[in-house]
Image (cartoon, helix red, strand yellow):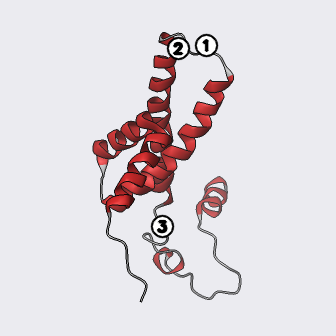
């Protein structure tokens, strides 16, 4: 009797309306849907890498005596790191950069900061030929 109860517990669930249980592959394919774990991991690595880049900037400012370590600027650097990490990770994905190079891209971009990136972008845009309006 004990063995019968154990077998009933281990038996997979089947609908009372189904005559024959469907194989698992037809109910839920093993390769269905986006690879969410890889996306979440990529985002977490990007934010952590960006945080490292912004903390390098913050530590440099602390060493120069321009900031105290525990200050409101530290909180602002954290917010900037999250935003830059997600944007730079998306840029790296668009450019086809993977692996450790992607992490380095995010750290370097976070280190130079949003103001430098904007200045470089403005310079590049000013040098591109403009489309004529006919």
Q: CA distance from mark 1 to mark 3?
A: 44 Å
Could you tell me which residue is drawn at 36 percent across and 37 percent down?
108
Q: Is 88 situated left or right of 7 in this image? A: left
Q: List x then y, in percent, for residue 32.
A: 47, 72
In front here: 28 or 14?
A: 28
Q: List x then y, in percent, for residue 44.
A: 50, 43
Say which residue label 1 marks.
68
Q: List x then y, in percent, for residue 86.
A: 51, 50
Q: CA distance from mark 2 to mark 1?
A: 6 Å
Q: Considering the image in quadrants, where does the N terminus appear? A: bottom right
Q: Are marks 2 and 1 in contact (CB under 8 Å)?
A: yes
For the image shown, how many numbered marks are present on the structure? 3
Say which residue label 2 marks.
62
Task: Please tell me whether residue 69 is drawn above or below residue 123 in the rendered image.
Answer: above
In front here: 63 or 55?
A: 63
Query: Which mark, residue 34?
Result: 3
Q: Is 100 situated left or right of 27 in this image? A: left
Label 3: how many Cα within 10 Å (few below 14, some 14–19, many 20+): few
Q: CA distance from mark 3 to mark 2?
A: 43 Å
Could you tell me which residue is drawn at 49 percent across and 52 percent down?
87
Q: Are marks 3 and 2 in contact (CB under 8 Å)?
A: no
Which one is earlier in the sequence, the residue at label 1 or at label 3? Answer: 3
In front here: 33 or 26?
A: 33
């Amino acid at each position: 009797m004990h063995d019968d109860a154990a077998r009933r517990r281990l038996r997979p669930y089947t609908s009372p309306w189904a005559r024959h249980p469907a194989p698992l592959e037809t109910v839920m394919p093993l390769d269905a849907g986006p690879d969410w774990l890889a996306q979440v991991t990529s985002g977490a690595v990007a934010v952590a890498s960006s945080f490292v880049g912004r903390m390098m900037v913050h530590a440099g400012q602390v060493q120069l005596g321009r900031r105290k370590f525990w200050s409101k600027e530290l909180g602002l650097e954290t917010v900037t790191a999250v935003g830059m990490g997600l944007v730079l990770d998306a840029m790296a994905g668009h450019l086809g950069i993977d692996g450790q190079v992607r992490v380095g891209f995010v750290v370097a971009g976070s280190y130079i900061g949003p103001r430098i990136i904007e200045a470089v972008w403005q310079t590049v845009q000013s040098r591109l030929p403009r489309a004529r309006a006919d």
